[in-house]
Image (spheres, rainbow, N blue to C red):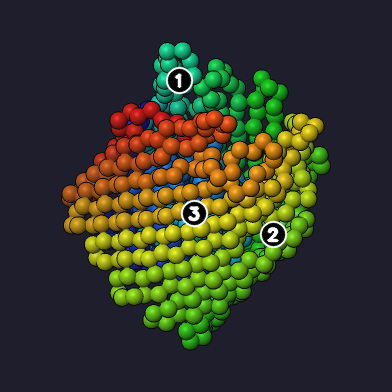
Amino acid sequence: MKQTLIHILLLMGLAGNLQGQMAMDTIELPEVKLVESRLKTHSIGSNIDIIDAELLGFSNSNKLADYLSVNTSFYIKQYGALATPTFRGTSSSHTLLLWNGVPINSIANGLSDLSILPLSTTDEVAIVHGGDGSVFGSGAMGGSIHFNSNTSFTPKKEIILNREIGSFGFKSKSLSLNHTAKDLSIQLLFHDLVDENNFEFRNITQIEHPMQTKDYGSVASKQTKVDVAYKINNSNQIFAHYWQTESDREVPQNMTTPFSDAKQYDNNTRMLISSISRIGNLSFKIKQAYLEEDFRYTELLKNIDSKYLTKNNLTDVDLRMHKGNYLFNIGTSLANKSVANNNYLDAGQKEKQTSLFYAVQFSNDFLHLNTVLRKEWQTSFEVPYIPTLAFSGEINPFLSFRFKYNRNFRSPTFNDRFWAGAGANGNPNLTPEDAWNKEGGFDYKSDVVEFSSTVYSLHISDMIVWQQQDNGNWMPDNVKEVWNRGLESNLKIKVKDLSMIANYSFTRSTSEITTDNLDISVGKQLRYVPFHKGNISFILSEGDLDFVFNQSYTGEVTTTYGSKEDKKLDAFILTDIAIRSEFKKSPISLECKVKNLLDKEYQT
């Protein structure tokens, strides 16, 4: 399907001052936001991408799933109303999402639905290739995605009104405000979206493949964000963040189902207060977060009404000391989690989680070394020690190398342990999934060209798989072993007003042991993991006008294993274009975007 979007933005303020401040914001960001973050501190040996503002554009309605699909080498599986990531061939629960350093994956099922996570222009979004379990804890096995509020104390006053209209009944509007004085920064964002999603498609499951209109799949969502920062003095700062997302969706079924009444309701509330204090070579940071997820899925024709409410109270403390070429970092966290689920035998479940990590870093002009050791204590199961050893070195001002060897894990979720009903039962005796990761790469950076390449090998054991028992019920167990290995490459070239950005990944992901007598997947590529994934973008800037051209390639994926032949989805190439203009002497900006320009048919 081909989709056209038009964005109209009104910037109320002095255009000259706004543009000058925007440039200063870009400079100030690393000082204000990233120096104190664990992501930046423990980035040694890691391959990290920052989402490019030129590709993001003006819109506040970009979905994280859509952006990653066409602008990165990660595979996003989209089915029904759900979109989940596959980083380095891992499963959807092996990618950790963090908001200002706080994990926001569902504590009920361990997943993050990328289709309901909007990419706001007020955020900085970083993507980490590979696991960081010793720093961020459970779930960060294949990779992690970090949403960081773009806080700066550069004086600024700005109001942005955004109106978007697109094909298939798409409408969006947002209001963002930024008031920043010398010591106080207040940023607000209100966003509302409605998408009827009534596009035409060719139904290949019916005789003669007739054209049909998908008239069930509408989405209505709202987003509210508040970011407040107060600088008491140069050594003490206080931050407060609030992020609420609401989504009501009609859940479409596959092409073989003529009618569906499935609906899904998601309401997520996230609150965070933090403070940073510095005394000489010491820094101290404390966070207090509250996360709430209210979920409901109904399918009245099948008598399904599934709902749960999760609550997570998290306290996190981080202490650092610089001494010469060394950095000593110790951190601890305490989480009180609860889930009320009408599919559990005991509807209310609670647990406590305590973690402690210690890191020592050494840095000089040539070598950067990072060692980390983490230990967690859970109410219901034992978590092993999680170590990391990473280093990087600079060969010359343009070329550097890096290496990382670490252990990662994923704790069994509440659903894995306590589910009861609908022909399935949880297993309270599950243990954490265990993974060992090795990766190495190099980075080249000049004024014109940036290139990086990484090879990796990831072994996962005790992987949790739901299996059918002799009585016909399904139950999870630690039975699977997987080996993921591959290559990732990124290239950026900028010559005057023309920029090119390209990404490519080769992923080989295989089962190493059989999980039961009927398992025929050993040695085969895992389902929904393409061997090849890549994209290329060109950005041409001419005065007030920007033109963006993007092509993304997704290789074929296996969907079902067969005794004679496996079922697969074909490879496909998608083409998107965008034209936008930000007038220097006017408060109006315009953007027009066409997705799937060539109207390519594809399935994921």
- Residue in the picture at 67% in, 36% down: 518
Q: Which residue is mark 3?
A: 485
- Residue in the picture at 18% in, 57% down: 496
Residue 149: x and y, percent? 47, 57
Nearer-N-terminus badge (2/3): 2
* Left or right for 593, reference 262: left
Q: Nearer the viewer, mark 2 or mark 3?
A: 3
Estimate the spatial distance between the alpha carbons at disc 2 and disc 3, rounded to whole Å. Answer: 33 Å
Q: Quadrant of the N terminus?
A: top left
For the residue pair 245 and 302, the one nearer the viewer reads as 302
For the residue pair 496 and 381, the one nearer the viewer reads as 381
Q: Secondary structure at mark 2?
A: strand
Q: Which residue is mark 1?
A: 204
| Mark sitting on residue 335 | 2
Seen as rendered, the residue at the extreme bottom is 324
Residue 121: x and y, percent? 40, 50
The kind of residue on which mark 1 rests is Ile
For the residue pair 512 and 528, the one nearer the viewer reads as 512
The kind of residue on which mark 2 rests is Ala
Q: Nearer the viewer, mark 3 or mark 1?
A: 3
- Residue in the picture at 76% in, 33% down: 473
Q: Residues within 10 Å of mark 2 (few under 14, many from 20)?
A: some
Q: Secondary structure at mark 1?
A: loop
Residue 447: x and y, percent? 24, 65
Nearer-N-terminus badge (3/1): 1
